[in-house]
């Protein structure tokens, strides 16, 4: 059986598994026999990747079938400082699994989305899980917390997603809430009103925020960076998801 390496973001971990990505997503989201429920976000990792920080070969040696021949679901190689020790070049597809075990694979995009007007909201996925509103575009936001920090807070890398703000992006004070699913809209408005493109560039909404967010609120895609390397995984449009990934789309909206 083929042994895969997966880099999980929820929680941050490097895992060896005999399961294919879709099977691993179902297992990681719902556990054995669908006895649990929770979103899972993970990357495929080049099976030839090695780093002295990880005992990858030992983990692979332990990833053997069960006595009855069934595949080994997971062997945790590391749950500490994983992101900073995996270069972006070692990452393959990104997978989003719903709380019901449906899994969608995203390939790395060749380009970043065009800059738009209005404010942004970023959910950090690893190594922290803060929720931040900002006047900075995604690439600038990443640079400001990695290579060009203007305060004492600095990270070697960061994986984050931009979430939609709807009308609040351009009119945080009076913009219609519409179908925004956020339960903290009043606090969100206050935070957005404090952001000033000419002054305070970013504002923390929640220092520690739940990583269970509605996939339908992903604005453009997910960003994964380590050092100077930043990759973008584009999210398909809602229409494309309805047409080409209907089971996943229904599952993520239940």
Image: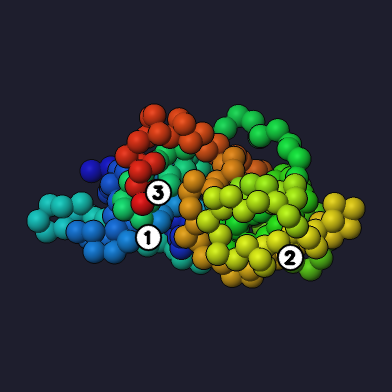
Going from N to C along the chain, the mark reached first, 1 or 3, is 1
Disc assigned to residue 84:
none
Q: Which residue is mark 2?
A: 190
Q: From what the image shows, is residue 206 above or below residue 34? A: below
Instruction: Give me the residue at 38% from left, 29% from top.
Output: 244
Q: Is residue 159 visible?
A: no
x and y, in percent, of residue 100 in the image: 31, 53
The one nearer the camera, 119 or 82, is: 119
- Regarding mark 2 in the picture, which secondary structure is present there? helix
x and y, in percent, of residue 200 in the image: 84, 60
x and y, in percent, of residue 105 in the image: 42, 39
x and y, in percent, of residue 127 in the image: 58, 62
Q: Given contact means CB atoms under 8 Å apart, are the residues at marks 1 and 3 in contact?
A: no
Residue 28 position by quadrant: bottom left
**Nearer the camera: disc 1 or disc 3:** 3
Q: Which residue is mark 3?
A: 253
For disc 3, the neighbor class at 10 Å (few under 14, some 14 to 19, many from 20) is: few
The one nearer the camera, 214 or 129, is: 214
Q: Given contact means CB atoms under 8 Å apart, are the residues at marks 2 and 3 in contact?
A: no
Q: Is residue 191 left or right of residue 76?
A: right
Q: Given contact means CB atoms under 8 Å apart, are the residues at marks 1 and 2 in contact?
A: no
**Nearer the camera: disc 1 or disc 2:** 2
Q: From what the image shows, is residue 111 above or below residue 61? A: above
User: As drawn, which residue projects farthest toward the right?
Assistant: 198
For the residues labelled 2 and 3, the Cα–Cα distance comes to 28 Å
What is the number of callouts on the image? 3
Q: Which residue is mark 1?
A: 38
């Amino acid at each position: 059986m083929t042994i895969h390496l997966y880099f999980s973001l929820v929680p941050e971990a490097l895992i060896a598994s005999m399961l294919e990505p879709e099977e691993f997503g179902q297992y990681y989201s719902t556990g054995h026999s669908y006895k649990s429920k929770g979103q899972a976000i993970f990357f495929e990792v080049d099976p030839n990747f090695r780093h002295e920080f990880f005992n990858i070969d030992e983990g692979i040696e332990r990833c053997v079938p069960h006595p009855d021949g069934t595949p080994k679901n997971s062997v945790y190689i590391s749950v500490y400082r994983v992101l900073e020790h995996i270069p972006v070049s070692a990452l393959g597809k990104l997978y989003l699994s719903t709380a019901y075990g449906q899994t969608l694979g995203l390939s790395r995009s060749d380009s970043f989305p065009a800059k738009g007007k209005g404010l942004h909201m970023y959910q950090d996925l690893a190594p922290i899980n803060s929720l931040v509103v900002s006047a900075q575009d995604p690439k600038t936001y990443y640079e400001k917390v990695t290579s060009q920090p203007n305060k004492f807070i600095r990270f070697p890398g960061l994986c984050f997603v931009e979430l939609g703000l709807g009308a609040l992006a351009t009119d945080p004070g009076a913009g219609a809430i519409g179908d925004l699913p956020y339960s903290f809209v009043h606090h969100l408005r206050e935070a957005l009103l404090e952001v000033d493109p000419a002054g305070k560039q970013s504002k923390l909404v929640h220092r520690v925020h739940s990583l269970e967010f509605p996939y339908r609120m992903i604005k453009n895609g997910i960003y994964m960076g380590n050092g100077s390397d930043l990759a973008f995984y584009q999210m398909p449009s809602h229409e494309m998801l309805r047409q080409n990934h209907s089971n996943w789309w229904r599952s993520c909206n239940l």
